[in-house]
Image (cartoon, helix red, strand yellow):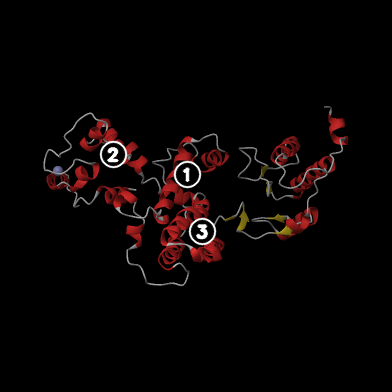
Amino acid sequence: MEKQQLYKMKIPLIFRQGDPISPLLFVLVMEYMSRLLRKMQEDPKFKHHAKCKKLNLTHLTFPDDILLFSRADVGSVELLMATLQDFSSSTGLVVNPAKCFVYMGAVDGDTRDQIMQTTGFNVGQLPFRYLGVPLSSKKLSLNYYLPLIDKILSKIHHWSTKLLSFAGRVQLVNVVSFAIANYWLQCFPILKSVLKKINSICRTFVWTGGSAMSRKSPISWKEVCKPRAKAGMNIIDLEFWNKVTMMKLLWDLRKKIDNLWVLWLHTYYNKGQNLMSMEVRKDSTWIVKGVMKARLSIDDCCNSNKARPRALFFQWLACHKRLATKEKLAKFGIIRDTQCCFCSKIETLDHLFYSCSVMKLIWSDILNWINVDHVPLEWNQELSWLI
Ligand SMILES: [Zn+2]
């Protein structure tokens, strides 16, 4: 189809919000907008935002929100507005100034006024919510987590939850509350006090069926959060899960170079340095600091450890619970005898690390020998300490 024809084409008003074809139309229309913005960059009057120049970044688009970036000078903003105008006249999609905001930093009063006049948008304040989570370069205070807490409370307050049995409440906490918190946890480290608050809401709901704080907890929350195999209720401990999600972000940072945010961080923060050994810059944002803190992880202890590769592989298998213990081998029918060679108990991972009385003595001697003052705990405790 020729360009002119496309411009003149009248789209019949048969598409409504929620139509299955909407995502496709959105991608098509946004591709056109991306091309307009790419073309705009060729104009020498346009200046990129200081932290976008190396990646030629001018915009991020999602169905509900579009972010546009440029240097805070009148010329660049005028070009951006002219491009938006082009886009509007071609597609019929018009910008609503009442719903648009400009965020500026280190800009003098005159320039600020001129920019406001050019755009006709309001001045926005950080943090603002983007895709449901607050965005800020500064550490978020407790107040910004209130929507998350309120959302979990609203699920718990729902009339239908009053009819739930204990098992039903455990299921609701595991599925609904965890899913809500997990969305935030996947984005940035959450304050310990917030996680404690959510944990206490979930704990109260599980034991009492309501949200009024109560001390009625026959079994500690730590025990409830253990897996079923350990006589727990399989509820995921959010404090622990937040560590896991930060490790996931760290993993992405190391491996997923083709992701835009990863590429951006490598361009402006790491600048080619080794991610695992570099010092965290003092001016790094709180999110970067949180992700970098996750370097003390399984990955770290496996990859930066000076132990022999054979020992590291052994440790890696143990971390993933894939060590060929007698109990496992017997399960596969390879051997019949499951007895520990030091005592009469079954040889499992937990038994070897470090429940077996003989193994405990051996490990204590080794730690003494290398001058480490530590008494081996259970495997899971040692692992959570390590992470
Ligand atoms: Zn033993």
Judging by the rendered image, the residue that carries numbered circle 1 is 249
What x and y, as percent, mark residue 307?
Answer: 25, 36
Residue 54 in the figure: left or right of residue 196: right
Residue 268 in the figure: left or right of residue 323: right
Q: What residue type is labelled 2?
A: Ala
Judging by the rendered image, the residue that carries numbered circle 2 is 318
- Tell me if residue 280 can be seen: no
Q: Earlier in the sequence, mark 1 or mark 3?
A: 3
Residue 295: assigned label: none
Q: Distance between the residues labelled 2 and 3?
A: 36 Å
Q: What residue type is labelled 3?
A: Lys
Question: As displayed, is residue 16 above or below residue 181?
Answer: above
Q: How far apart are marks 1 and 2 (CA)?
A: 23 Å
Q: Which of marks 2 and 3 is nearer the N terminus?
A: 3
- Residue lying at 53% horizontally and 40% vertically, measured from the top left: 262
Q: Distance between the residues labelled 1 and 3?
A: 18 Å
